Amino acid sequence: MDPDEKDLHRLTTNHSSFDYYFVDPTNNYCNLLMHFIMREIPLLCHVNGFRETPAIVATKLGCLRDYLILPENVNQHDHFSNTALFYAIQLQDPTTINLLAFHRANPTLKNYQGILAYGLDMQMNQPPNF
């Protein structure tokens, strides 16, 4: 396991909201830890019950890493139709914003409320970070 992956593993499993006992009935009753340990490329595009990819979850936790982003998942919408870039801007995390921009995250995608990730930046009276 490389150092970045160890950091992500530590941050995720030590986070106060990590539920070791949750079992996913839609995926052969695997628990969250089993999903996390099985690091394969198809899993990076796998979504949970809230339609979140590992990239969206890692963005929300403030620990997104390059290897979690694929062209197939960089613009994935969650159940609110927000992308990882939307959450990175909402959290005002310039490192994550730049990482997602490097991977061509689309700042013009709208969520269900019709808000653009780029527009969120403007609503918060912040200059664009990308």
Image: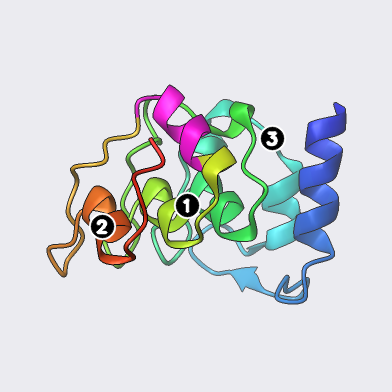
* Up/down of 36 relative to 70, above or below: below
Q: Amino acid at mark 1?
A: Ala
The boundaries of the magenta stretch are: 97-104
| Viewer-closest of 40 and 65 | 65
Mark 3 residue type: Arg
Q: Identify which residue, 114 or 91, lies in the foreground.
A: 91
Q: Which residue is mark 2?
A: 122
Residue at mark 3 to residue at mark 2: CA–CA distance: 36 Å
Secondary structure beneath dot 1 equals helix
Q: Earlier in the sequence, mark 1 or mark 2?
A: 1
Comes first in the chain, label 3 or label 1: 3
Measured from the top left, where is residue 107 in percent x and y?
26, 41
* Between discs 3 and 2, the one toward the N terminus: 3
Label 1 packing within 10 angstroms: few (<14), some (14-19), many (20+) = many
On the image, numbered disc 3 is attached to which residue? 39
At x 21%, y 55%, the residue is 119
Pinpoint residue 116: horizontal percent, then vertical percent.
20, 54
Q: Nearer the viewer, mark 3 or mark 1?
A: 1
Q: Position of residue 85 (x, y in %)?
A: 39, 46
